[in-house]
Amino acid sequence: MLIFFVLVGAIAAYLFLTYNQLIILKERVSNAWSQIEVQLKRRYDLIPNLVSTVKGYASHESETFEKITEARTRAIGASSVEEQAQAENQLSGTLKSLFAVAESYPELKADANFRQLQDELTDTESKIAFSRQFYNDTIQKFNTKIKLFPNNLIASSFNFTEMTYFNLNEESEARKAVNVNFD
């Protein structure tokens, strides 16, 4: 009889420990996503300032400015990880175009305001990359935990489901080469 109670107690302890570990990992995923959102908000706030600075020097590049504004709006309105990743990839590609335009204007590159904004945006991009990596690492730990046996039995019983990575897809604007043509 004692063996039975010890066995039931061990199973119950394992159940509680596994459930609590899954909750901890799920909360870490939420926290990691929040960190991405903080950096994206900072990026969204910097972009209009950067665009208006470049506009003063390259007013004929209105198509580039429109694409950046559209990409920023789409990124702000994204509602899922997949939509956010796709919108951020497009925004990264359009920002590359903006910096390519800026390269053609030596007086713009010498402008202190532009340099400061460019440095802040570069710093923010680095923080976004780190946050994405941390988010994906946390997702990987969570997804692995819910797939391992016997954890998968507990995870499915409590409706823990696999989460989506924040990926850069192959067709992404951010992967394409920038073509600047002043003809």
Image: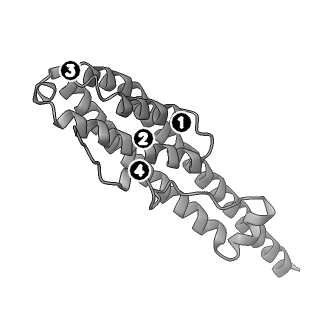
Report x, y in % for residue 108.
16, 26
Mark 4, Cα crowd under 10 Å, few <14 / some 14-19 / many 20+, is: many
Q: In which quarter of the image is the N terminus?
A: bottom right
Disc 4 and disc 2: Cα gap in Å? 8 Å
- With respect to residue 46, does 180 lie above or below? below
Label 2: few (<14), some (14–19) or many (≥20) C-alpha neighbours in 10 Å: many
Name the quarter where the C terminus is drawn: top left
> Which amino acid type is marked by label 3?
Asn
Q: Name the residue under label 4.
A: 173
Q: Residues within 10 Å of mark 3 (few under 14, many from 20)?
A: some
Q: Is residue 134 above or below residue 42?
A: below
Q: Distance between the residues labelled 1 and 2?
A: 9 Å
Q: Which element carries disc 3, helix, strand or loop?
A: helix
Q: What element carries label 4?
A: helix
- Tag 1 near tag 2, CB within 8 Å: yes
Which of 85 and 177 lies nearest the eye of the viewer?
177
List the residue tagged with mark 1.
74
Label 1 SS = helix
Q: Are marks 4 and 2 in contact (CB under 8 Å)?
A: yes
Between residues 171 and 30, which one lies in front from this camera angle? 171
